Image (cartoon, helix red, strand yellow):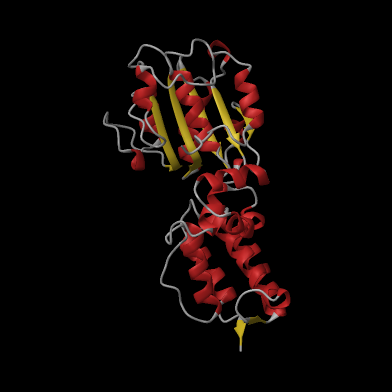
Amino acid sequence: MPERYDPTIGADAARAFFTRSSKTEIAHGYLFIGPSGVGKKSFARYLAQSLLCDGNGEHALGPCGACRSCVLFGHEGQSAHPDFIEHVGALKIGETAGAGFATTGDTTSRDLIRQLAMQSYSGGRRVLLLADVEFASPAAANALLKFFEEPPTGVTLLLTSSTPAAILGTIRSRLTQLRVAPLSRDEMIRLLAQRGFPYDAVERVLARARGSLTRALELLDVDAEAPHAVIARWFDEAIVGRTPEANWATRESLDEGLLAIKTLLKDAIAAPFLGEGPGRNIDLARGLKAFEKIDDAQRLARTNVSPTMVADLVRMAITGLVTE
């Protein structure tokens, strides 16, 4: 029987913190920070299930897995628990009127405020998880600011972010911040072995994955449409002078995508000197200039400029880098 996945792996500090805590000691809000793909969302969901569990007494961490609440919680990303609300990605401000609630993909700041102002269905705690949280505008963030200052009694707020500096300081200051570190080499090997990957394949991607399980899985080409695979194809087409058809750039993918492109460019420049990969020659001076352009694009990505425009600037910087 395969080893059961541990949703607290890599989150040593957070696990120790909540293991020492009881449900009565839980603060109103927590922000889990760390690189993408290291398990922040998995840990936050596990904590949410623990806090809503009816069978674990006053323990803040560790659901029983058998009570009605745990059964409703279901598998990751498929919770049917009425007192657990999850939203992934950017939040818009929403309309001021209307009592209906949108689906998860279209939930707004004002939707969440209306939902969480209601009483708990079970008569106990309610938990809101904002995963990979990003606010589409300052107004969307400000709409939730007072809510973060004075959340309703019995509501626990859980946020995850790989770019906490992009969250308003006034919001961050009202949350207890806990860091989830990159996974260790041994943890990565164990998790990938559980998924059936051979050791030699895992060895080849560990350095580039930088402690991110998500990035390692993408590098291993689990899914040809995984973000890293899409970006790699886009990069390969652009550097030989073709205009890529795929559009990988979204507000959520931009930061990680630009980092991935810089890594691909670095690897492409170094490959001929290391005897790796196809014999593609990239003019070193132009390659270094392209790095500067990508740095400019990363700064631009922190503004309200369209992600597609940022990606086009990068494409123009790397187009035709390969020389015969």
- Residues 17 and 185: in front is 185
Residue 146 visible, this angle: no
In the rendered structure, the answer to whether residue 84 lies left or right of residue 238 reads: left
Point 51% across, 41% down: residue? 132
Q: Position of residue 204 (x, y in %)?
A: 63, 60
In the rendered structure, the answer to whether residue 76 lies left or right of residue 82 reads: right
Point 50% across, 40% down: residue? 133
Residue 286 visible, this angle: yes
Q: Position of residue 175 (x, y in %)?
A: 59, 27
Point 39% across, 22% down: residue? 70
Query: How many numbered dots are placed on residues in this image?
Result: 0
Q: Position of residue 318 (x, y in %)?
A: 58, 75
User: Which quadrant would the C terminus be assigned to in this image?
Assistant: bottom right
- Residues 233 and 98: in front is 233
- Residues 55 and 149: in front is 55
| Residue furthest to the bottom | 324
Q: Quadrant of residue 206?
A: bottom right
Q: Position of residue 39 (x, y in %)?
A: 55, 39
Q: Quadrant of residue 98?
A: top left
| Residue furthest to the front | 1
Q: Please determine whether, in this image, residue 270 is positioned above or below residue 252.
A: below
In the rendered structure, the answer to whether residue 116 lies left or right of residue 205 reads: left
Q: Please determine whether, in this image, residue 21 is positioned above or below residue 131.
A: above
Q: Quadrant of residue 225?
A: bottom left
